[in-house]
Amino acid sequence: MLKTTVGEQLQRIYNEHSDKPYVGIFSFDKPSLLIPDLELANNILVKDSHNFMDRIFSTEDKYDPLFGKTLFGLNGQLWHLLRTNLTPVKMMFYLMDTSGKELADCLEKFTTDGKLPQDQYCYKKY
């Protein structure tokens, strides 16, 4: 009757079955899993991702050039290839976070007294 959204329905099912590792549901006419257990979800998304390559909602890039080339819009081998190529990018977040904090500290020192700090901290060579 469209009195609640899909998100609200999923939240209700999640709340009712949060004590279970997974719950079977139907998305339109296809069986799906709702995974409340974080450890199981992590295993599916990381360790067992090769078994879960296809999505219910996907599109071809000729119909939707933007969404059709994203990790969420691809299926099968193309999805697996993109996911494999993106995995090393996660390692860069640590470097970006560290460098950003160092830059913020250096700028904070500069704006505090109006002089560029002369310590080695702001002149690191990477």
Image (cartoon, grey):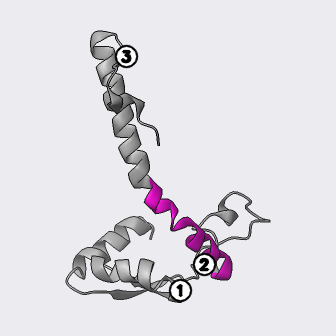
* Residue under pointer 1: 50
Quarter holding residue 5: bottom left
Residue at disc 2, secondary structure: helix
Residue 7 x %, y %: 39, 66
* Residue under pointer 2: 80
Residue 86 x %, y %: 55, 65
Q: Which contiguous range is marked in magenta?
A: 76-92
Residue sitting nearer the eye, 84 or 39: 84
* Residue under pointer 3: 116
Residue at disc 3, secondary structure: loop
**Mark 3 to mark 1 CA distance (whole Å):** 51 Å
The reply to whether discs 1 and 2 touch (Cβ–Cβ < 8 Å) is yes
**Mark 3 to mark 2 CA distance (whole Å):** 48 Å
Image: 123 above or below 34:
above
Quarter of the image for the N terminus: give it: bottom left
Which residue occupies 51% across, 68% down?
87
Residue 49 belongs to magenta span: no
